Image: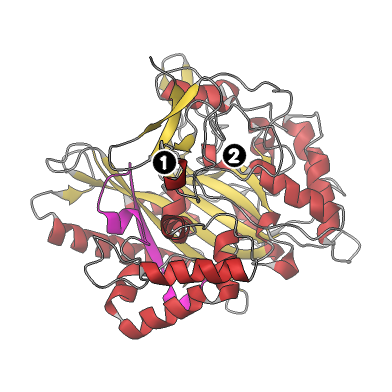
Amino acid sequence: MASAPRASIVFALALGAASPARAVDTAPIERGTAIIDPAALRELDHGRFGLARIMAPGRAGDTPLDDRELFALSSMLPVSRALDDDFERYIVKHEAELPNESIGVGPGFAFQLFDRAQLHSPEVRFVLSGIVNRMDRAYVLDKSCGEIRLIYRLTETNAKAIGEAAVTPRLPMTLNVVLKAKGESGDGKMLTCAEIARRWLNAGKLGATGAALADQLTAPGGALASLGSENLDRIETNLQIAHAPKSATQHFRTDYLMKVFNYDEAAGVFAEAPMEDQIDRDRLLADADLARDFRAFILDPVHFAELDRGTLVIPDRFLLRSAIAPTPTGFAPSELQPAFGLVAGEDSAGRAVFSKEDIVVALVREAVLDTNLQNIKSVDGFERRLNDITCTGCHQTRGIGGFHFPGVDWMAAKPSNSTVVPASPHFFGDQIRRRDILTAFADGKAPDFSRGFSSRPQVRGSTELAGTEYQDGWGAHCYVSHENASENDKSFQGWTCAAGLTCQAVSPATRMGMCFVTTR
């Protein structure tokens, strides 16, 4: 596996100051849960996990699949059409809301669109930039033991010389190929979830890198040995649809378009699908009957407890099929927070789906039922959780731009010396929980699929993250406590900082902040 990412130092330097290193930094945080070794990914991309092998297994030859060929596949035609439709809707909406801000492809526009021609170019292709174990999502795909995600980054294939190194430019789009974790063992029998988990945990102990690691991962008994195109479940796309470096009305802004396409095996195509837990806020606020049904669903005692644990799966009828996530934060709340205005408050304009009394009554009921809620302990906790489970709400929390996994750039001249880590603080902070779930699977125990807020990892009793920006170290998200302890929000009062640091609010309007060195 890859050497330990010095993520705390890298992110701190990116913000202009150094962060203390982890007290014990002998093993990579992602061990057993992700593959991010650059040289190993290069070998896997050139071999059985090149996109051609996954998306077009019957295709002759082993040459890479460029974009012109990828989007010409019959299975990908619905994807191409859906993306075009979303681009057109985005342009129309932009022109209606910002008529004086030009929009188009190229530097001459205030809002510069992603060049869709790149999706049909022979000089651009998706390159494998990471493989991530998501067996922690087995509560959604229980019979499949969860998911394994192959993450591909859009990249120009013609290297350009920059300074002393040849660099292959990466483009702001990822293609997440989601595979069902369960596969055949090689003798025609299906692997158990326990065996799959053991293979991944064992992979985290391998000392090899590069081609040797790739060989061990794909050899019989290896973590990737049972995976292939037959495991296809869906693809997820995330692209920077537009950015505004020179807008007169917007400070630097970047919008990301996210979509999901389920694989229809019978038809052999990827069909546009609702995005998991991506609440259709506008439709709920406009449709009283739909809002009533959604309120009843969420406030149901069983579903309320699932929402608290982060394992709720919202029915498709309440969801969107595409979403735009703006970054950095600070734009229209309705875009930034899908749950904004669903709970009655100053900005709900009388259209809210939930009253504050609804939430208070639900909290009292859960206490009577002895549900032992972990995260939702207040009205603000409920609203944050409802936003947090959505795709856009999560991607805008502790992400790198609009991505949680930009991925490894092994096509760079010196990928191991890259100053950009392959994933966000949210990603690294969640690895303890994910590995704990793998360990439970491997030991034949019932996994605890619960998770904390995206801003604050669930540590599972581990001290591995203590003192880092993931938990309570420099740059960690925190809650500014009231002088009167009784006024502290119970949902967030445990978000404290390590010794020598203090929680400083990000703005006067909130008690949410970040841990920084105490000033006198």
| Rendering coords of residue 358 (x, y %) | 42, 72
- Which of these two is toward me, 8 or 109? 8
Q: For mark 2, give the secondary structure.
A: helix
Does 500 sit above or below residue 295? above
Q: Amino acid at mark 2?
A: Gly
Q: Quadrant of the N terminus?
A: top right
**Residue 224 seen anywhere in this rendered image of the structure:** no
Q: Which mark is residue 171?
A: 1
The residue depicted at 69 percent of the width and 61 percent of the height is 146
402 and 380: which is toward the camera: 380
Residue 250 position in % (x across, y down): 18, 42
In this picture, is 366 found above or below 106?
A: below
* Residue 229 visible, this angle: yes
What element does badge 1 sit on? Answer: strand
* 469 inside magenta stretch: no
Residue 430 occupies quadrant: top right
Residue where numbered disc 2 is placed: 429
Using the image as rendered, state which of residue 218 and residue 439 is in the foreground.
Answer: 439
Q: Would you call the spot at circle 2 few (<14 residues within 10 Å), some (14-19), or many (20 or more)?
A: many
269 w.r.t. 154: above or below: below
Residue pictured at 49% horizontal, 66% vertical: 277
Q: Is residue 328 magenta?
A: yes
What's the magenta region?
Answer: 312-339
Image quadrant of residue 94? bottom left
